[in-house]
């Protein structure tokens, strides 16, 4: 019996080299035992054998990342068989092929889950902010995912710690042994954003716990800040849905305008699904993801900001970064619950220029605003708000198709027939003001505008 102890559980190349040497010697699968770890029994003749690419190698490499202990034996048997007769790989009923496909599918899903469910927490270290996440993958998928995270979070210094392996990025990726949940802070300020966002998009009438758990298995809940909200939302869902059903039908709040253009979207959910693959302009290429509007589909008040910033691009929700904090504080001051309003952007993808590792926000061009305004108008058709607040010049252009000065329009109602628009400054403008007195005046005016809009739409 040949005993092969691989050093790492996720090193398909090392496995293939051992396998090539074994095949060259004619060692049949039943005479090989595979394990990971202690290299004391390392296969003596493990001189890497030069090898050509194997047919089915991508499938084999993915299956090797599975946690199932039989994966090595299965893949070696597949290679052994392929050495003689490659045709068996074309027979979909072959049981080895089915087993390999099953492992591969589970690994691919695990890779995608990690991309969606890693949640970073910020910790200060000697060089500024570092972002660290604790994650428990189902399989050995961290190394296979590293390029994705490097590309997505190129401007951050980050670490992803899993029980098997850690990845650390400081301009270059480095792998180290796994860690424990205690290595990562339990909470940070962003967690509340996740919960707010989740509560805002949660639709009690659509709750289906079985489907939810198939998308988001319970084992992931303990590491997801937003998952803490699920039990309470789920408990309240039935009552909320019954209240919705029992409520008398409401008359349209305003005379609804006819649709400006034909849309195939039947609701906001469809619209969001279509938006996810938008390639109407080149901005989708560099952005991490599209950032859709968020809020109830029957909101009386719609807020239109400019475009997602760095934070929004990373977490996929509008106005959750520094400008979002100002906006939230303003809502708190005027007594408006963000969950009752619809918040969106004129442009749905982040635009930036790279400065070293940092992604610096770049203003959308008039052309980009005009192209993306198609989506904004579809959102308006779906939500049909009583009033729209345009925060800043980009929002105003997207809504009107023309360039107006915010200074001249601020605080005034623009009646476009099908929608009424109140213009105010963008909260990022308040952040940029240096002079204290100007800042106070601009803040006051911003609060007044939002209070007026809230009163008009929601009174
Ligand atoms: N600025 C915006 O205009 N929108 C966002 O979502 C974030 C920052």
Image: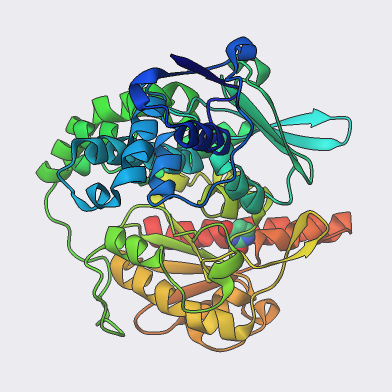
Query: Measuring 11% from the left and 50% from the top, which residue is drawn there?
Result: 248
Asked if residue 409 is positioned above or below residue 107 in the image, the reply reads: below
Frontmost residue, 215 versus 432:
215
Q: Is residue 240 left or right of residue 110?
A: left
Q: Is residue 192 left or right of residue 363?
A: left
- Residue 210 spot, x, y in % from top left: 20, 32
- Residue 147 spot, x, y in % from top left: 61, 48
Query: Measuring 32% from the left and 44% from the top, which residue is drawn there?
Result: 84
Asked if residue 171 is positioned above or below residue 359 in the image, the reply reads: above
Q: Split into 4 quadrants, where in the image is the N terminus?
A: top left
Frontmost residue, 142 versus 125:
142
Residue 326 visible in the shown view: no
Q: Residue placed farthest to the front in the image?
A: 25
Residue 303 visible in the shown view: yes
- Residue 10 spot, x, y in % from top left: 53, 31
Question: What is the tally of numbered marks visible in this picture?
Answer: 0
Q: How is the image coloured?
A: rainbow
Q: Is residue 169 left or right of residue 276?
A: right
- Residue 199 spot, x, y in % from top left: 39, 38
Frontmost residue, 277 versus 399:
277
Query: Measuring 58% from the left and 62% from the top, which residue is drawn there?
Result: 287
Quadrant of the image occupied by residue 339: top left
Asked if residue 140 is positioned above or below residue 113 in the image, the reply reads: above
């Amino acid at each position: 019996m040949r005993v092969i102890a691989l050093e790492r559980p996720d090193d398909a190349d090392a496995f293939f080299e051992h396998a090539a040497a074994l095949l060259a010697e004619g060692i049949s699968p039943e005479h090989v035992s595979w394990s990971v770890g202690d290299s004391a029994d390392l296969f003596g003749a493990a001189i890497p054998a030069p090898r050509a690419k194997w047919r089915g190698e991508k499938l084999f490499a993915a299956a090797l990342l599975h946690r199932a202990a039989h994966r090595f034996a299965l893949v070696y048997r597949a290679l052994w068989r392929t050495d003689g007769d490659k045709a068996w790989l074309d027979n979909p009923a072959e049981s080895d092929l089915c087993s390999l496909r099953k492992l591969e599918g589970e690994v691919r899903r695990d890779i995608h889950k990690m991309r969606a469910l890693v949640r970073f927490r910020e910790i200060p270290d000697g060089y500024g902010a570092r972002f660290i996440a604790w994650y428990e993958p189902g399989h050995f998928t961290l190394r296979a995912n590293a390029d994705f995270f490097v590309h997505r979070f190129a401007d951050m210094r980050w670490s992803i710690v899993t029980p098997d392996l850690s990845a650390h990025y400081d301009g270059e990726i480095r792998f180290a042994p796994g860690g424990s949940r205690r290595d990562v802070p339990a909470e940070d300020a962003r967690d509340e954003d996740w919960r707010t966002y989740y509560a805002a998009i949660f639709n009690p009438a659509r709750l289906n716990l079985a489907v939810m758990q198939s998308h988001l298995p319970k084992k992931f809940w303990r590491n997801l800040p937003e998952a803490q909200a699920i039990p309470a939302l789920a408990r309240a869902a039935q009552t909320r849905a019954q209240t919705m059903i029992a409520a008398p039908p409401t008359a349209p709040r305003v005379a609804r305008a006819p649709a400006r253009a034909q849309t195939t979207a039947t609701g906001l959910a469809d619209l969001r699904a279509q938006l996810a693959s938008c390639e109407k302009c080149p901005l989708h290429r560099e952005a991490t993801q599209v950032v859709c509007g968020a809020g109830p589909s029957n909101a009386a008040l719609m807020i239109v900001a400019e475009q997602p910033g760095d934070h929004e691009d990373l977490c996929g929700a509008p106005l959750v970064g520094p400008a979002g904090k100002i906006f939230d504080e303003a809502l708190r001051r005027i007594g408006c619950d963000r969950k009752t309003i619809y918040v969106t952007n004129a442009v749905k993808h982040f635009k930036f220029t790279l400065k070293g590792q940092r992604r610096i926000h770049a203003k959308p061009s008039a052309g980009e605003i005009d192209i993306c305004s198609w989506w904004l108008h579809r959102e308006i058709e779906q939500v049909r708000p009583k009033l729209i607040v345009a925060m800043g010049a980009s929002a105003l252009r997207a809504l009107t198709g023309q360039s107006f000065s915010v200074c001249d329009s601020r605080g005034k109602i623009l009646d476009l027939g099908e929608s009424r628009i109140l213009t105010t400054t963008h909260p990022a403008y308040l952040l940029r003001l240096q002079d204290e007195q100007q800042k106070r005046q601009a803040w006051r005016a911003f609060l007044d505008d939002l209070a007026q809009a809230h009163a008009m739409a929601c009174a």
